[in-house]
Image (cartoon, rainbow, N blue to C red):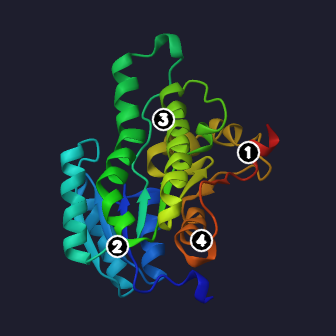
Amino acid sequence: MNIFDLSGRHAFVTGASRGIGRVIAVALAEAGADVALVARSAAGLAETAAAVEAVGRTACVLPTDVTSYDAVAAAVAAAIDQLGTVEIVVNNAGGSNFMVPFGDLRLSGWDKLLQLNLSSAVYVCHALAGHLLARGQGSVINVASVAGVAAAPLMSPYGASKAGLISLTKTLAAEWGPAGVRVNALCPGWTATELNRTLWEDPVIGPATVAGSALKRWASAAEMAGPAVFLASEAASFMTGQTLIVDGGQTMMG
């Protein structure tokens, strides 16, 4: 359908070297967008770029540490220089590599996850604010998590960072809406990626983790492609400040 067509658009996607970020970047390209690919792994970005180019779109590879504002600002400048404009922003970089009760949490771990999951999106939005507002159009998609809308036992810094990202989404939607820039959050539930392979491959822990959801299974990263393209496209032209939860009925079940 034409309302999902992204021909002539240009996207900036962080965390694009693997997992959900790669899936979203390629989906945007399949819908017609050229894509600036941002992550630390040059090798992973090269694989994503090959998939983008395989569908006939331009891929701009930008190895970047998104926890550094200077590095993010340089990547944004390079993307605009190489693509001409940016109308679609996907803040997907993030994750958590530990689970621990809050009382045993090392505060250095808290700082690290807040920087990766929340500050990185702040840096991208701040660096692109002038460009988006001057153009008077755009769609920002902040990839949060159901951990940001409910309790996140053993994952307090991850949950807090994602809740902060949802709050940032609503505030930017309110501030940028009059200029024609939409800002929404995409909140996946438990999604099987390389980062959490040890969980979803475990024959006991894997099923138990999603037993409380309606669909009682893990999502595939590919199942985040459609929602992302929707939010980026004219199909969501009157949607801003919203939290699109794609969790197989996890939060619904309580």
**Residue name at image x 75 percent, y 41 percent:** 211
**Residue name at image x 45 percent, y 71 percent:** 137
Q: 24 or 100, which lies in front?
A: 24
Disc 1 residue crowd, few under 14, some 14–19, many 20+, Cα 10 Å: many
In the rendering, which numbered label is found on residue 120? none
Residue at disc 2, secondary structure: strand
Cβ atoms under marks 4 and 3 closer than 8 Å: no
Task: Locate residue 30 relative to residue 145 in the image: left or right.
Answer: left
**Residue name at image x 61 percent, y 46 percent:** 190
Sequence order check, earlier mark of 4 and 3: 3
Question: Mark 4: which amino acid?
Answer: Phe
In the rendering, which numbered label is found on residue 35? 2
Residue 237 percent location from the top left of the image: 60, 72
Q: Which residue is mark 4?
A: 230
Q: CA distance from mark 2 to mark 1?
A: 32 Å
Question: Mark 3: which amino acid?
Answer: Ser
Q: 108 or 142, which lies in front?
A: 142
Query: Which residue extends farthest front?
Result: 178
Q: Which residue is mark 3?
A: 161
Q: Which residue is mark 1?
A: 250
Sequence order check, earlier mark of 2 and 3: 2
Q: CA distance from mark 2 to mark 3?
A: 26 Å
Viewer-side label of 1, 4: 4
Sequence order check, earlier mark of 4 and 2: 2
